[in-house]
Amino acid sequence: MLARKSKSVCKAEHGFVDLWVGVRTAIPVVLLLITLLRDVQWLKPLVFTLGIASILEVLVVQVHVVLFGGYWAQETESGKQGVKGVHRLLVNALHNYAEVIAWFALFYLNLGSSFHTMRQNVHPTVDSLNFSFVTMTSFGYPNLGPTDTLGLLFTLVQSAIGLMMALLILGLIVNVLPVPITRTESKGDNAAETQARGTSPHSSRDRR
């Protein structure tokens, strides 16, 4: 009974975390879609308040995952901290990565005086999203650039966050990949297993 209750509680906690991460990622995406349709000035204080709070929470959560195993840490038989569901941590980290890109795109969109663009026929929202993606991943060439200290600080902060989260996601991907077994290891395991049974690899040949 206790095992069933603990499993149900664990599933409920995981479901809540998945729902929370999904809603958090959807909020900046919806705000970006709204800015594509119309220029809403009253969203500016909301964007900066929610965006800064969300990014700080992402940083706290990811640092907690790196140092302590996150919400899924458990005590193993050896006394060390283990992690439940590396796949889940990886998916959540990717969600957070996309969330940070979307929030910084909204920041750049609302800091128009701090940036200049070399594009004339592109929607400002799309230009800001492209610059945020390029800054976060370093894939491509940015057509938007900072013109003052405030814009440069935002760019530097996002670059640092992108580097940290890229290393974290890479580490999680490495943990998810299966461990390859070489021929030497497989032969050694077979030999050890054969010796454990009290026979040698050449026992059938010796009997002849």
Image (tube, grey):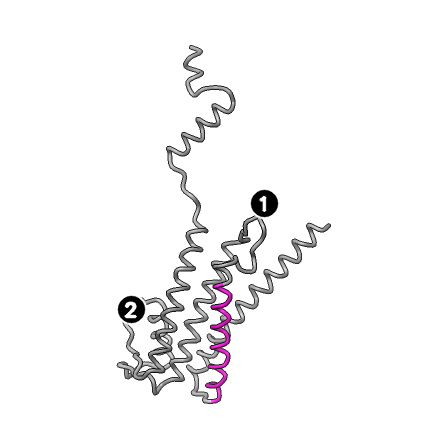
| Residue at the image position 44 percent from the left and 16 percent from the top | 203
In 3D space, how far apart are the residues under numbered discs 1 and 2 (Cα atoms)?
A: 47 Å
The mark closer to the camera, 1 or 2, is: 1
Q: Residue furthest right?
A: 1
Question: Is 167 or 36 nearer to us in this picture?
Answer: 167
Label total for image: 2
Quarter residue 73 falls in? bottom right
Helix, strand or loop at label 2? It is: loop
| Amino acid on which the number 2 mark rests in the picture | Gly
Question: Residue 74 placed where, x, y %?
Answer: 58, 53
Question: Residue 7 placed where, x, y %?
Answer: 65, 53
Helix, strand or loop at label 1? It is: loop
In the rendered structure, the answer to whether residue 9 lies left or right of residue 59 reads right
Question: Residue 139 placed where, x, y %?
Answer: 31, 66
Question: Is 65 or 13 nearer to us in this picture?
Answer: 65
| Amino acid on which the number 1 mark rests in the picture | Glu
Quadrant where the image shows the C terminus: top left
The residue carrying mark 2 is: 140
| Residue at the image position 42 percent from the left and 60 percent from the top | 168
| Mark 2 surroundings within 10 Å by alpha-carbon count, few (fewer than 14), some (14 through 19), many (20 or more) | few
Which contiguous range is marked in magenta? 42-63
The chief SS type of the magenta part is helix
Q: Is residue 56 magenta?
A: yes
In the rendered structure, the answer to whether residue 31 lies left or right of residue 140 reads right
**Residue 162 against residue 152 in the figure, above or below:** above
The residue carrying mark 1 is: 77
| Residue at the image position 63 percent from the left and 57 percent from the top | 10
In the rendered structure, the answer to whether residue 160 lies left or right of residue 10 reads left
Question: Residue 102 placed where, x, y %?
Answer: 43, 74
Q: Residue furthest front?
A: 79
| Mark 1 surroundings within 10 Å by alpha-carbon count, few (fewer than 14), some (14 through 19), many (20 or more) | few
Q: Residue furthest bottom?
A: 41
